[in-house]
Structures are given as structure tokens and as C-alpha cells.
Image (tube, helix red, strand yellow):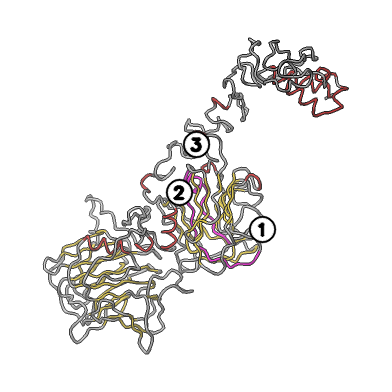
Amino acid sequence: MHLSRWIASIAAVTVPGSRFRAWLARSACTALGVWALTLAGCSSFSSSSSGKDASAGRDGSITVVTGGGGSDGAAGAGGAAGTGGSGGATTDAGADTSDQCPDDPFKDAPGVCGCGIADTDSDFDGVADCVDKCPGLNDTADTDGDGVVDCMDECPRDKNKSKAGPCGCLADTLAPLCLAHRYSFNGAAGSTVVSDTGGLPSDGMAINATLSGSGTITLAGAKTGQYVQLPAGIVSAVGNSGTFEAWVAWAGGGNPWQRIFDFGTAGTPGVQGQGFSYLFVTPRNSANNRLRAAFTLAGFGAAEDLTDAPGMLPAAALTHVAVVVDGQARTLTLYQNGLAVGPPATIRMGPSATYYFGLLQDDNNWLGHSQFSADDDFSGLFSEMRIYSRALTPAEIMADSTAGPDLLPTEVADGGTGADGGAGADAGAADGGGSDAPPPPRITWRAFLPLAAGAGGTTGTTADTSGNGYNATFVPPTLTFGANVLFPNSIGINLTGAGGEIVAIQPKSTGPVLNVAGSYSVSVWAKLADVGGFKTVIGGEGLTISPFFLQKRADNNNNWAFTVIAADSTAAAACITPPLPPAPVDGGPPPPTPPPAVIANTLYHLVATRDATTGLDILYVNGVEAARNTCPPGGWMDTGVMGIGHGYFNGRTDRVNGTLSNVGLVDRVLTPDEVAALYAAGAAAPAGP
């Protein structure tokens, strides 16, 4: 277009306020400098011309002439002719009665938004921002088809929900934890199924890799294509707030931009390329070699909201990494080992809404794999991945980090027993909970064995801290305690289930640790790596059979149970709590709902109580009564040996492959309050003498 025509088109542009049109055209001519003198469109804006501003100052009384040739440029009390009215005010002197916005230099009529507010339409939908319900954003998109446009829908992917609840866009029944997905990498060695024990189970799949069999998966990195694929859509489904936690041990080295996780898309489901919608965490970026979290819906670079830690992720150490997306605070915060690292990133937004995390296009939800084909895969080990459908607080993040990858902490708010996120898994213990967790109850134990350490020798010994001297012996003496390479998530003594392993409390000259013919209670924290078959965590030893088994059964849905045997005979009757369901009868009532199955590599607190007078047996799991059964009263004397990690049936059997801690034995029935307090005190709490 010819420049003179361009200037004329500017002057004629349809914008409310003739003065603004003149100012725009005059500015264009000024920018062109000396060239403007040769353009017809600029002839009326020569250096001697002044338009409105060249007219008299506040004391002048002449009518404004827009874009005139300077005839209004006579000197007034406040301005000199032809010089832009130096000293003249930008407000009209009151003589122009047609100006309805005398104090607005850009408008002479109120328009849609009124004087002083521009009638801007930033999303070009024909509605000015000042009255637009979704200014700057798409007003018509309705992803879930619920009749509420996305920009007004707090749950844009759920047609049954347009307002977020306590657990965001997911079921309110997940409250208070709102733990939607939990991947602990349990399962048999060589398996590729990554089970989800969260409140909304959605199993993942290991790609070109397999589970270790001990609650971890190791990825080789580089361009090996080893990663974990989680189901599409589970991340965006949480809504505009969520928390994403991982426990990883990065191998270190290698190229930058490896991914701990990357949830998003590169355009085609299942295919890498150039990511444009994602939330990711990398142990080291190439810009500053730091741990980084980034989120975008519009591609990388300037469109990203990101935050960096002070340094890269530590190598060869199990590290807790968390990202909290808070849709209300409009922040993205990165945590390392429970502490926020780096300043929270501000999530870009429209004037009244977030950047809509719930609209993330998460076709590819990957652990250890990037949306970008140029990036290497993650090199290292995964121990746990969790997805919450709300923004956890800093205290809750610290509680999770302290508790570790296999323990759900108690609710930080009140130090209570918490919930299990709907997974039927452990609700956690005090050491993973808040600082207000109650102290352990004052129980006068017959024996209390933390199983935190042992002394070697021909036969190993682990201490009884009750003061009664019922130490446990163990063979082989090479059994280990606490976390190590083979047991990274140990809570105490580590057992492999091998036939030669024996942990037992021997009777003293003054008598056994428990008289199992009378009333008693046993307490233990347990985590089983193998949940196949029968597994006995605590059991007495008779000549042919245990007088009781606190065990995981192989029947009745593989549940926890307290089994009492009527006599020292393998043919004696067994009274099981909870009882086995009756055989189904045609036309009869449906069978009762079975108790929940024991989940591998999940921490449980178990208490069994027996009242020898009434025969009432009660089983508690995670601080609450799971079942009760009235069995024959009384009992029989066994050999006085108390087995830990095995039962007895014509020899030691039902051996545990897993880790145990805090074995407590007392010669009375514990109360429900005492059991709840034991659970709330946690797996690592000291014994209350």
C-alpha cells in the first residue's frame, strides 16, 4: 500500500474517539520523520500544525479542531502557538460540548466500557473484555459437552462436574488425601504391569523394561526406549490443581533433559516429536544444569511456566521430588526431599482464570521418557509415583517425604490416623505424619522388639527394649536391618523367605514371653514383598503346630487374619478371624464381601487380641477393627518359642519375604484406643514401657 494511503487509512480507522484517530495518524507521521513532509496524508500534521494540542491551554476558550492546519494555534494563557500547547492541559477547556469523555484523551464517547476504559477485545470474539466472561480466552469451546464453556468450567473434561470439589474434579470420596493414583512398582520380577493402588486404579505398563521384584524398576537411559507408560487422560482429569510425587535414584551423568516424568503430547499419541502441551520434571536442564519443572499448553520456550532448583538432582541417592500445581494460587512449586526449591512459578492466566491445567492434552503420560524426540530417557531407578487431585500443603509434602515411598503419612492437620486414599493400602504412620502425632501409649509390654538392629556372632541377637530381657535370636547372623541395596524401603529386619532363616524369642527359665493359654495381644508392623501363599508374621510354636498365626492367608481373598488352633495337632480345629465365608447355596443369600487383599510392598500395622475367658478374638488393621470372631475359650501351652516371620506346621513354614518392625507382646487384651494410638505413633516410634 502507498504510504499516503496508509496514513489516510489510519486516520479513518474505526476506533471510538476522533481525537484518538488523529493522534494515531499524527504519531505515524512523526515516526516517518522528514519523509512525512512529502506525504499528502501528513500535510495537515506538519511541524507548524498542532491539532487539538496546539490550541490554547486551559485558559483558552476556542473549540477543538482535530487535525487542522494550525489555525487554532494562537497562543493562549498556557501554551504557545504551533508547539503542541506547552503548558496547555490535556483536558478540554469545556468548550467542546460534543465530548462525552472530557477527561479521557482517547475517547469522546463512553462506548461499551465507559470513559477511561478501553473497549479492548483481546480474544476477537466481538465482546469487549470489560463485559466478557472469559476475556482473552476462547468463549465457545466446551470440551466435555456439558453446556458450560471451558473457560467457566472448573472441570472441563468431566461432563458431570463443572465445580471442583475437595478432591478437584475427581470423586469426593477420595478425601481427605485425594490420592488418585499410586504406582509402587510391586509385582513379580520380570513383570511389565505397573499396578495402581490409588483410589482410581489405572495400571501402567513398563516399556522395554521389567519390574525388579523388590518394589522398584530400573531404566537404562540414553536412547534405549526404556520407560513406563501410564494411561492417557489421568493427569488432566484431576482438574486445575494437582500434586505429583516421585521417589527416584538418578544415575547421574548422560545428556541433559532426561525426564523423571513428562505428561503431555507431541501431537500424536504414543509418539515423541516436539512437545507443545506438557508438565515435566528433568533432573538437569541444559540452560543452567539444574533440576527443573515446566508446564505449558502452548509449546516450549517463552510459553513455558517453569521453576528451577539451585542445582541438579543428586546422583545415586533415593530422592523425593514433587511438583504442586495450585490452580487457586496460580503457582507451580518444585520440591526436593520435602522442601520447596526455587521460587514458585506463576502460572499465566486470563484476568479471572488459571492457565487451565485441566486442559492439558495428556496423550502421553510417561515416566522416564520425554515428549521431545531429541531428549534421552531417564537413567536410574523408580521406587514410587503418586498423583493427588489437589494441591498438597508444604507440611503434607514434608510429611510424605519423611514417611518415604512406601508409607502414607497420617493427616498432618491433626496427627490422626488418616485415610488410605481409597486404595486399601496403608494409611501411614506417625513418623510420616505431622509433628502433632501422639506419643506411643504407655503399655507394659512383656517384650517389645524394634527390630532396628542386631548383633552378629554364631547366632545374631536383636534387643527387647521392654526391660524383661526377651531378646530375639536370628540365623543366619548375616540377616540385615534397615534400608540397603536389596531392601531400599526397609522398616526393620529384612527377610527373604529362605528356608534357613529363623527369628525367634526363646523362653527363659522364668517362663515364656507369652502364656498363650491365657489372654494376650500381639502387635507388629509388616511389609510383604511376596504376598503369595500363606505368610505368618507372628506365631507361637507347639510340637506340631502354632497355637496362633497372625498371618496373610492364601484363601478368603488373601486377607490378613488371626487364626487360633484348638489343640497341638495339625488335625485340630482352626478358628479364623475373619471367618471364611460359607459355601454358597443355590437360592441362598449372596456370599459376604470378602476382606481386602494384602498388597505387596505396602506397610500395615497389625494387632491381634485374644480374650481367653470369653473366646473373643479381634483383628485390627491400621488402627481399626477389621474383624472379630467368638472362638472356644481357653487354650493350651506351647513350647514357649515365639516365632517372628514364620509359623509352625510340622516344622517352621509360611516364611515372610519382606520387612518387619516393632513387635510387641503383652499378656492382656489391648483396648481399641490403645491400638489406635499404637498405629498413630507409627512404625519407627519407640516402645512405651
Q: Nearer the viewer, residue 83 or 131?
A: 83
> Compared to 273, does 543 lie above or below?
below
Q: Amino acid at mark 3?
A: Asp
Q: Position of residue 619 (x, y in %)?
A: 24, 63
- The picture quadrant where one finds residue 524 is bottom left
The residue that disc 3 covers is 144
> Compared to 570, does 8 lie above or below?
above
Q: Which mark is residue 333?
A: none
Q: Amino acid at mark 1?
A: Ser
Query: What secondary structure is found at the residue carrying circle 3?
Result: loop
Is residue 242 a member of the stretch shown in magenta?
yes
Q: Which mark is residue 391?
A: 2
Who comes first in sequence, dot 3 or dot 2? Answer: 3
Q: Amino acid at mark 2?
A: Ala
**Cα distance in 3D space between marks 1 and 2:** 29 Å
Q: Position of residue 214 (x, y in %)?
A: 46, 69
Magenta residues, as a range?
226-254
Who comes first in sequence, dot 1 or dot 3? Answer: 3
Q: Is residue 26 visible to the viewer in this orientation of the structure?
A: yes
Query: What secondary structure is found at the residue carrying circle 2?
Result: loop
Q: Nearer the viewer, residue 26 or 162?
A: 26
